[in-house]
Image (cartoon, rainbow, N blue to C red):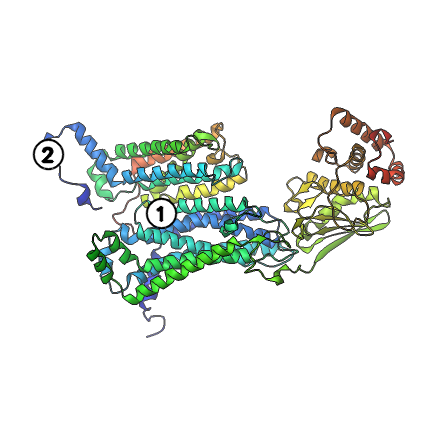
């Protein structure tokens, strides 16, 4: 997609457009440039994958192994959110729009909520090990990691940190680690795990909102 | 012009550029961290036995490499589509296939280099610790084939479906496939269609795998064959990528004809089709071979008749490490396989006090020896064998304990396991039974004597429950009778205990003595 495709000339003179519709249009354009509609489709695919995994027993029903496949899909949903933060416009957009931090905040929170909803819908009627509260906590934490990663690698490679941490958590799961910072492997009642997960999300969200992802007009790698 | 300043040929220069600009090196620190935690620490938790340590390559290392290899290859493959430069690069003189192959080769070089470096580190550490054997190569071949096929799959996905979501979705898909394969492989039972054997992911083997018998390479061969087939087929499909893209946008028959009329030469297309055919053939052969797998009747596991070599079925020459204990004036030899010689002193130290209690009694063992944990495809348990009797145990099972040689998380329980295993065999088995047999669970009197002897050597019977010789959970009256008999027998002097055992051992083994009859 090019800027020409996205930034179509307004249908009516800007002066005559009501503020509410301008806001909606701005939000829509922001979401479109981040490929959020396709991201929603990817999140729906994650939910469907979770349902298929639980329904056809791609994993064990109980014990530590039961958490492995849901954790992969949760990391996948977080990776999808992290990838949507990439902007094709780079610094130009930042210098032109003062609402950009609010739009970033709105998009990240909204997508995280929708990811949890999609995965929860995927698990309805199936036996999800540790329940949806752990699912939500894991998605929130992984998303925070993805947002933090986007500050360094840019949006397109921001999936790597959630994926790497998930791989480490597979080890922590089998070794029964109890540290709260290994929140994906802790039970729902572990308050420390909740604090760590939410702290990572809050840090990622706030830094991402203020600074934005690392962006270049052309990805060099 | 010197050799150093001479320009590289075009392909080499393009590959050098690709290696320089590839995204993989930037993510190597993350991959190294995951490798340290997931693979290296898991391997360190295993005893330094080559086959066991090598199992982490496919069980752990391939998992973490799959995530990154698939995603990063998809990232490299989607480059032209992501940057909207397809039309631009189509005008270059080089064929699309050559261009894509260089991008794939650059990514694959980095990933395989990282993989082999990880294997070298794993094997290097094991080489310094292992006391017998050498590095198995088939797990490395399977791992390298796994990294390659995942990279090619990811790259092909990137080429055909370029976009920002391709890389993470490929990474997730690869991991899900891996987990589903592992679940299927671990749930595989004899009599089922053994297609799950195609999955490189599986549970760790038994602790003495590859020590008494060769590990048949049958399974590894079909896995490599399948993965090579998929990789070759997809490589061929990449050769048709421009044509397939045009075909996807063609709207009429004439457009379809036009799509094939343009682009790379017919020779390249023919080679691509041949590669696709060969790859599909290899993959189909591997699948059909896996379907014929049968349980291995020699060393356990699975064998594929069409690939199985009878040379593999021959036992490996026994290599034992022994130590001699001087107990009550007579020698008691404790032997384990050289691969487990790191545990020999601990085994001897655990058995010594119990041997001192029973030495000289009828049927008392004159030695202890570790044997293969699989014989004729059946699991072997500890017991008495030979004449004069020798206490035989395996690296996997001693008495009712499992995985004794896998590690020593609780030294007291580990020691108690050996002592109970020996007393179980001594108090229940007839001497000279001929082959290893499991301890037959029997009477309360035997349990009371065993508990007393264990307590006398400083081991608490409750380490392992204190009721392992009984059939099921005893009722309150039986438990009270066992406790009382244990206390009475323990209160006797060592010589009095030996005298009573010498006189009543046959009856005790036969189960005709009750706890009340114990002095």
| Chain designation of label 1 | B
Q: Residue B361 location, x and y as percent? A: 86, 44
Determine which quarter of the picture holds residue B516: top right
Name of the residue lying farthest toward the top? B476
Q: Secondary structure at mark 2?
A: loop
The answer for which chain carries disc 2 is: A
Residue A12, disc: 2
The residue lying toward the viewer, choosing from B478 and A141, is: B478
Residue B412: percent from left, percent from top: 70, 39
Picture disc at residue B288: none
Q: CA distance from mark 1 to mark 2?
A: 39 Å
Residue at the (43%, 58%) spot, across then down: B229
Q: Residue, x 28% and y 44% (percent of image)? A: A215
Q: Nearer the viewer, residue A12 or B230?
A: B230
Horizontal arrangement in the rendering, residue A183 relative to residue A22 (left or right): right
Q: Position of residue A124 (x, y in %)?
A: 41, 30
Q: Name the residue tied to disc 1.
A: B167
Q: Position of residue B330 (x, y in %)?
A: 85, 50
Position of residue B336 in the picture relative to residue B357 (left or right): left
For label 1, the crowd category at 10 Å Cα-Cα, with few meaning under 14, some 14 to 19 and many 20 or more, is many
From where the camera sits, is residue B262 visible? no
Residue B423 sits in quarter: top right
Is mark 1 in CB contact (under 8 Å) with mark 2?
A: no
Is residue A57 among the parts visible in the rendering? yes
Residues marked 1 and 2, same chain:
no
Residue B167 vs B447, above or below: the answer is below
């Amino acid at each position: 997609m090019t800027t020409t495709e996205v930034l179509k000339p307004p249908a009516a003179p800007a002066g005559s457009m009501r503020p509410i519709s301008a806001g909606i249009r701005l939000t829509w354009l922001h979401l479109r440039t981040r490929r959020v509609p396709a991201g929603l489709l990817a999140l729906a695919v994650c939910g469907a994958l979770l349902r298929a995994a639980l329904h056809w027993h791609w994993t064990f029903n109980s014990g530590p192994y039961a958490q492995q496949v849901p954790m992969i899909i949760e990391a996948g949903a977080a990776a999808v959110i992290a990838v949507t933060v990439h902007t094709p416009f780079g610094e130009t957009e930042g210098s032109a729009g003062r609402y950009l931090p609010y739009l970033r905040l709105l998009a990240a929170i909204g997508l995280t909520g929708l990811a949890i909803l999609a995965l929860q819908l995927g698990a309805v009627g199936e036996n999800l090990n540790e329940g949806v509260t752990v699912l939500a906590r894991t998605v929130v934490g992984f998303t925070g990691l993805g947002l933090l990663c986007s500050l360094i690698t840019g949006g397109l490679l921001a999936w790597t940190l959630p994926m790497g941490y998930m791989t480490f958590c597979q080890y922590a799961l089998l070794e029964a680690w109890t540290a709260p910072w290994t929140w994906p492997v802790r039970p729902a009642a572990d308050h420390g795990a909740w604090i760590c997960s939410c702290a990572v999300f809050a840090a990622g969200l706030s830094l991402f909102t203020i600074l934005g992802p690392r962006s270049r007009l052309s990805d060099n790698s | 012009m010197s050799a150093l300043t001479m320009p590289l040929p075009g392909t080499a220069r393009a590959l050098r550029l690709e290696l320089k600009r590839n995204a993989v090196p930037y993510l190597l620190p993350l991959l190294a961290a995951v490798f340290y935690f997931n693979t290296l620490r898991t391997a360190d938790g295993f005893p330094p036995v080559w086959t066991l340590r090598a199992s982490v390559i496919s069980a752990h290392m391939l998992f973490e490499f799959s995530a990154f290899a698939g995603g990063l290859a998809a990232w490299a493959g989607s480059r032209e589509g992501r940057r909207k430069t397809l039309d631009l690069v189509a005008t270059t003189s080089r064929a699309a296939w050559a261009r894509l192959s260089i991008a794939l080769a650059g990514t694959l070089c980095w990933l395989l280099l990282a993989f082999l470096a990880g294997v070298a580190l794993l094997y290097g550490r094991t080489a310094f610790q292992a006391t017998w054997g050498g590095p198995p190569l088939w797990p490395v071949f399977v791992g390298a084939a796994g990294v390659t096929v995942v990279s090619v799959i990811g790259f092909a996905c990137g080429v055909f479906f370029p976009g920002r979501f391709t890389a993470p979705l490929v990474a997730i898909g690869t991991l899900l496939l891996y987990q589903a394969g592992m679940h299927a492989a671990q749930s595989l039972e004899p009599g089922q269609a053994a297609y799950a054997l195609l999955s490189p992911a599986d549970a760790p083997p038994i602790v003495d795998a590859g020590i008494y018998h060769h590990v048949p390479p049958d399974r590894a061969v079909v896995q490599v064959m399948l993965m090579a087939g998929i990789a070759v087929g997809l490589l061929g499909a990449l050769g048709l990528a421009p044509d397939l893209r045009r075909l996807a946008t063609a709207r009429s028959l004439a457009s379809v004809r036009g799509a094939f009329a343009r682009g790379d030469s017919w020779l390249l297309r023919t080679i691509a089709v041949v590669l696709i055919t060969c790859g599909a053939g290899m993959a189909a052969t591997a699948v059909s071979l896996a379907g014929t797998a049968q349980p291995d009747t020699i060393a356990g596991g699975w064998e594929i008749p069409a690939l199985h070599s009878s040379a593999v079925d021959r036992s490996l020459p026994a290599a034992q490490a022994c130590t001699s204990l001087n107990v009550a004036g007579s020698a008691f030899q404790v032997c384990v396989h050289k691969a487990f010689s790191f545990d020999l002193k601990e085994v001897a130290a655990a058995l010594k006090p119990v041997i001192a209690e029973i030495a000289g009694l009828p049927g008392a063992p004159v030695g202890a020896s570790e044997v293969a944990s699989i014989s004729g495809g059946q699991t072997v348990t500890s017991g008495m064998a030979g004449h004069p009797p020798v206490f035989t145990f395996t690296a996997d099972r001693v008495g009712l304990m499992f995985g004794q040689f896998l590690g020593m998380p609780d030294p007291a329980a580990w020691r108690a396991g050996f002592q109970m295993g020996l007393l179980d065999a001594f108090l229940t088995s007839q001497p000279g039974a001929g082959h290893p047999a499991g301890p037959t669970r029997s009477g309360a009197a035997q349990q009371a004597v065993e508990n007393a002897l264990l307590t006398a050597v400083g081991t608490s019977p409750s380490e392992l429950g204190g009721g392992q010789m009984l059939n099921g959970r005893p009722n309150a009256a039986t438990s009270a009778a066992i406790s009382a008999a244990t206390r009475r027998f323990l209160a006797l002097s060592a010589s009095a205990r030996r005298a009573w055992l010498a006189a009543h051992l046959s009856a005790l083994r036969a189960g005709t003595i009750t706890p009340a009859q114990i002095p």
